[in-house]
Amino acid sequence: MTATSFYCSMVLDDIGRYPLQARNLLLCLERKGAIPRSKIVVHCTQRVDEDLRRRLQDYGCTVQLIPPYLDGAYCNKLMQLDYFLYPKVQEKALDEGIKGVFLLDLDLAVLSPLQVPDTEVVWGKPVDAPNPPLACLRGIFESARLEPPGLFACDSKAEPTLETNFNGGFLYIPLALADRVDRAWRTWAEFLFDRPELFAEYQDYRKHIDQISFAMALVSESLPYRHLDAHDNFPCHIPHTPRSYRPDRAIRVLHYHDCLDDFGLIAPIFSDNGGVFDSAIQQANTLFALQDDPMAYLIYKKYLASKAIEALPDTFDIFSESFINHARGKNGGRRLILHAGTPKTGTSSLQWYLADHRKALAAQGFWYPPPSEAGEPKHQRLIALLMHEDESAFVEYCEESLAQMPDHIHSIIFTTEGLYNHWRDFSPPAKSRLRAFASIFDIELCVWFREPESFAASLYMQYIKNPVPPGSDTPQAGVYGRDIAFEEAMNDEWFRLHLDYAGFYYEAEALFGKNRVQAFHWCGDTVKTFMQRYGIDLPDSDPPRHNASLRKPGIEIMRIANRYRDKLSYSDQERIARIIGDIDTIIGDHGEAFELSEAERAIVRRYTDRCRQLMQDIMHRSPR
């Protein structure tokens, strides 16, 4: 008998997050679950791309093609047991001492060798909450003329459900019982699917046919079963620990449901303050960050981007015909260049340079609308209006910005790092308005990215300097002007998402169109790169550096001042930041530069390593 006595099985469909989840699960099974690739069976629907199926085979898995079953979604999992009933598979299992199969949802993180105390019985964890409601289940069992089993208190709030109402994400089936389970499971699934009236008062629960039919199969066949507790199927989507959780026991399997964040890591909605749950999340995310399938990650990022843009309302008709005609010009086809930053990539230097050369730019056919900021020559008003949901004011600003534009202008330049900084703060209607404005022109959005570790450090240094109105509840208030260390800043989702270069790139591309977004690798001279990219012929000079970052002494003093943030007015915070900046400048090279520790760099890499290859393929390393 070999060391591994189980198969693992999963179902893969053509949904954007599934390939990444599948590769994460495969990595967990091999690294932590003690399941070799040869014992993993991936059942792919016919919708799954052939290239993805081939890559799974190359990985060493057995790939089975299955037709959609019943609802073509949740019920597809019922097709898995077929494979394990093939005579050749059964013979091989007998020869190798394989006792059973784990049926796994893709949204699991396996952190320990997969085992069950008794390999001859069915194992599953009762549902976390009474879904479907007990009344619905009782009605179904009565209609099927089945005696319902006993009751069980759910793990979440101790509400009652049937004791065979298992969460379908993690099931163990003995191979000796597979045929009986398969036949009964399908019989009851088809019974439920053909009787939608059983869900007349519970329409939202018809999607649980796979789960309910399994509960019915256990009863109708009098199959032996046992219960798993939360440590073998731990939910990450409920805001508290389950009743069966024990803080002195390790978590063997996490079930993260829809808690996968923009980086493809698990972001649970509760914490046990450094206990075994937090430790399990860290273990899983460390593994997920190692996942080396860039294609799966690319599919995931594009899936998130398309979902975000599909949610936008249609607001293409917000501009008047007269403005559109003026904006496009007599010959049409004017170009709109939106420079999105990012922060700390020479953005201020570019803005000052463009503002200082407005007349020369106009002579060459480039219109740089009058800056909207008194202190900084950028178009921050555009961002403020997108943030404040004032459509008429947004339209008015766009019209005013181009009102004095001469007829010979061929390109319009707007620049503000707020486009990147607040991209995820914009509501769907706001992004739709921005798209409506951009659609008038031949749009190109350009953005500069620097190495993530360097960018994260610079962003931290800038954000603790930034003032924020006292009592503000804006997303940035968690990091602006705060007395926090770098690691604390990385715990803030708003801060962390600024490292999601691929997320911004693909969502902007989905918004403006393919090939409408140009990303550049920041190499220290954004002004020169910008000029060469867009064919601007102005004197080549070294623009002065703006918004210099603080050194360590300045950061230490700034953090002390930030302890009084809520007691200081916005203007006083600005004044303090200027004074501390002057102090930091006076100290100069006598003060140590701020650099991330190796532990802090590791945190950044956990979130950004999978993005690196995607961005390397996208970014221009030198001007074209």
Image (cartoon, rainbow, N blue to C red):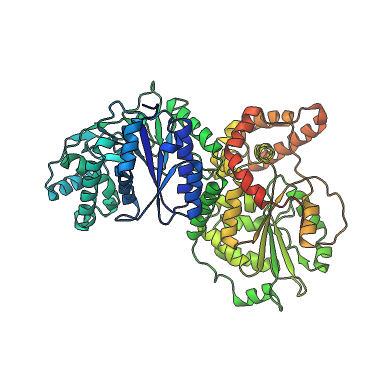
Figure quadrant of the C terminus: bottom right
Query: Is 555 situated left or right of 152 in this image?
Result: right
Q: Quadrant of residue 605?
A: top right
Query: Picture coordinates of residue 341 (x, y %)?
Result: 69, 51
| Residue 237 position within the rendered picture, expressed as x and y whole percent measured from the top left | 39, 39
Frontmost residue, 366 versus 82:
82
Q: Quadrant of residue 567?
A: top right
Observer able to see residue 21: yes
Determine whether 490 is above or below 140 in the image. Answer: above
* Quadrant for the N terminus in the image: top left
Residue that appears at 54% across and 53% down: 302
- Residue with the most extreme top position: 248
Residue 397, percent from left and from top: 64, 64
User: In the image, 225: left or right of 368?
Assistant: left
Residue closest to the eye, 165 or 328: 165
Residue 470 visible at all: no
In percent of the image, x 27 and y 27: which residue is there?
118
Q: x, y percentage for residue 335? A: 70, 67
- 198, above or below 243, in the image: below
- Determine the residue positioned at 20% across, 43% down: 217
**Count of marks, rendered view:** 0
585 in relation to 442, above or below: above
Name the residue at 48% across, 45% down: 56
Q: Is residue 569 left or right of residue 224?
A: right
Extreme residue toward the bottom, this view: 330
